[in-house]
Amino acid sequence: MASLSLRPLRSPLRRALLALALPLAAGVAFAQAWPAKPITLIVPFPPGGPTDVASRIVAQKMSAALGQNIVIDNRSGASGTVGAAAAARAPADGYTFVMLATPTLLASHLYGPTGYDIFKNFTPVGSVYDLPIVLVVNPKALPEVTGLQGLIAKAKAENGKLNYTTAGAGSFGHLTTEQLKNIGKFEMQHVPYRGSAPAVTDLIGGQVPAMFSDLVAVIPHIRAGKLRAIAVGSGQRVSLLPDVKTVAEQGFPGFDATSWGGLLAPAGTPRDVVERMSTELRKALADKEVQEKLQGVGSFAAYRTADQTAERMRQDFERWGKVIRDNHITNQ
């Protein structure tokens, strides 16, 4: 039986092999030990919003599987760029992640330089949830409008003077409505608010008659009969509103507008850690209890792999960036 040589590694070849082996061994040891302490998940939006609530639901499930707490760190401001910038500066050691939402993905189109590159400074882990968007009208203000074509006919009859509201200039509802106007060749006047809550309040009060809104903000009012849902922006119907047709079903084939959230890590985070997080994320989103909790707040579990998430980021960045440029939309 051959014995193991313990002679000093004097030759250049032996020294080179040792230099290669040490980092690999260290990487394997790190992956086996990780996570050795709590993980921080930066949520770049305020507590209580859809991104925050979805993050907490998923983080709780993943914490149990990882054996370490995932601590939510809310750092809101400027469509999520404040929190994303903090995550971009964080050490790439596997202990900091950030929840990307569509507004943050598109922020550089609206705000200009953000201090980081959403594609170069982050590594996708996986998609987490879809947040459907729904077109609603005040049934008292527009009693005759029961579908999308009815709203378009009303807008054309009023020569573009019909108002619609959103959660703000550059919000996903704003972008979706502007793209729909471009495709459908009709005009409506945008009345932006600072957030969904005041916009929905005035929509219910009749000050504005229509709105493209996140489902989570309006579903209680739809169920109470205060608002009428006439179309959903996603490519498929939403289980919470099974009788409401999609925009695509109402004369716009292929139309699909869905806000979403995904988990990112600072660029350079060890690959084994990213893969482990992606695996645990997939398992968490496959859990029926997690799915039910997400649906309870108006969002839907929607896992995609890291590569699929990266591709979705690129596609949405280009698509909605064009809408922003073509319609001269700013955050003001």
Image (spheres, rainbow, N blue to C red):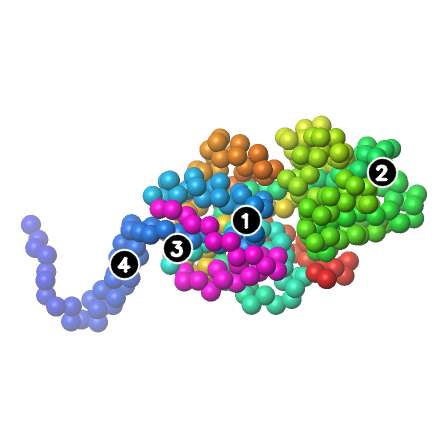
Residue 108 is a magenta residue:
no
Q: Which residue is mark 2?
A: 141
How many numbered discs? 4
Distance, label 3 to label 4, CA atoms, is: 17 Å
Q: Is residue 173 above or below residue 324?
A: above
Report the magenta residues as a range: 68-92
- Residue depicted at x 72% and y 56%: 169
Q: Position of residue 40 (x, y in %)?
A: 42, 53
Look at the image and tell me whether residue 153 can be seen.
yes
Q: Which residue is mark 3?
A: 95
Closest to the camera, between mark 3 and mark 4, is 3
Closest to the camera, between mark 3 and mark 1, is 1
Instruction: Return the disc, 3 or 4, that comes first in the chain's sequence.
Output: 4
- Residue depicted at x 43% and y 56%: 96
Local SS, label 2:
loop
Q: Position of residue 1 (x, y in %)?
A: 6, 50
Q: Is residue 3 above or below residue 48?
A: below
Which amino acid type is marked by label 3?
A: Tyr
Q: Which residue is mark 4?
A: 26
- Residue depicted at x 56% and y 45%: 48
Which amino acid type is marked by label 4?
A: Ala
Instruction: Return the disc, 2 or 3, that comes first in the chain's sequence.
Output: 3
Closest to the camera, between mark 2 and mark 3, is 2
Q: Is residue 237 above or below residue 131?
A: above
Which amino acid type is marked by label 1?
A: Pro
Circle 1 packing at 10 Å, graded few (<14), some (14-19), many (20+), is some
Q: Which residue is mark 1?
A: 47
